[in-house]
Image: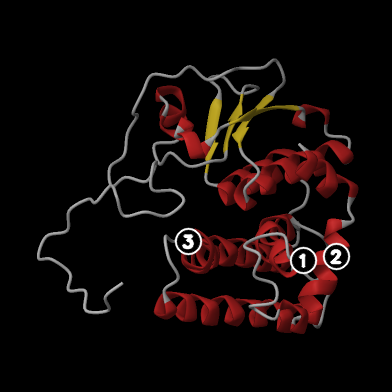
Amino acid sequence: MSNDYTPPKVWEWDQESGGKWASVNRPIAGATHEKTLPLGKKPLQLYSLGTPNGIKISVMLEELLALGKEAAAYDLHVINIGKGEQFGSDFVKLNPNSKIPVLLDTAQSPPQAIFESCAILHYLAEKFAVLLPADARERTQCLSWLFWQESSASFLGGGFGHFYSYAPYPMEYPINRYAMEAKRQLDVLDRHLAEQDYMCASTYSIADIAIWPWYGRLVLGEIYDAAEFLDVASYKNVARWARSIAMRPAVKAGIAA
């Protein structure tokens, strides 16, 4: 491939640009087809897939069930994003951004739809009054880390993960750029976790549930096949934290779901 690319004055969509997601990526929003979503009988309906963002919510729901929150019972409906099911008409009504996961709380009247994974975590923590510190200072710290993940993971997933694993061919500049940022983020976590067991000092929380499927599974070698490339073994505090969370029964159940 030539390195002398010059952007055109007006960008136009090239459907043949390649990459793993070329068949479903597009520069417009909205539904592409009519599709009725399934609806189970449990209070919470989860429309998702086993991506890092999807795993967050199944883990959260399993943690709630483990805490005895019977109203957290859920039906899980797989949305195959590789086949473009996120652009079905009913799904787009729940999430105009056409991304998984989406949670529908049918215990509310009318049913409440929540999209964006960290918004779902926060909604569930508030609804059930658990996994979010009550102390104002610790709560603020927890929310800071929750939103850190929301803003940072796009560099790990859409940046590093895309160019390292999904792009149509290896490109040195973007891989180097996003590898540097991924390692900087891992260093942020490693320094923070050197002084405490969880993201929030006193307890396991939605901050851990949000961060682990991305960064925990990265250092465990479970996403992007990049553990050696990023030298994840050097982030010993992140690795210790990641292993401890991976052993939680609710985390195992959430992944299995």
Report the Cα–Cα distance between label 2 and label 3. 25 Å
x, y (%) of residue 151?
50, 64
Image quadrant occupied by the C terminus:
top right
Q: Quadrant of residue 23?
A: top left
Q: Is residue 249 above or below residue 215?
A: above
Q: Residues within 10 Å of mark 2 (few under 14, many from 20)?
A: some
Separation (CA) of disc 3 from disc 1: 19 Å
Residue 220: numbered disc: 1
Q: Position of residue 127 (x, y in %)?
A: 69, 38
Question: Is residue 176 visible from the viewing direction of this image?
Answer: yes
Mark 3 Cα-neighbour bin, 10 Å: few <14, some 14–19, many ≥20: few
Q: Secondary structure at mark 3?
A: helix
Q: Which residue is mark 2?
A: 243
Q: Residue 49, percent across and down? A: 62, 39
At label 2, the amino acid type is: Arg
> Residue 206 at x, y = what percent?
71, 55
At label 3, the amino acid type is Gly
Which dot marks residue 158? 3
User: Going from the N terminus, do you reach mark 1 or mark 2 first?
Assistant: 1
Residue 29 figure quarter: top left
Give the secondary structure at mark 2: helix
**Contact (CB < 8 A) between labels 1 and 2?**
yes
In the image, is residue 132 above or below residue 151? above
Could you say which is closer to the camera, residue 154 or residue 33? Answer: 33
Q: How many marks?
A: 3
Tag 1: amino acid: Leu
> For the residues marked 1 and 2, what is the alpha-carbon distance in whole angstroms?
8 Å
Q: Residue at x 68, y 43 (%)?
A: 57
Compared across the picture, whether 162 is left or right of 75 comes to left
> Is disc 1 surrounded by few (<14), some (14 to 19) or many (20+) residues within 10 Å?
some
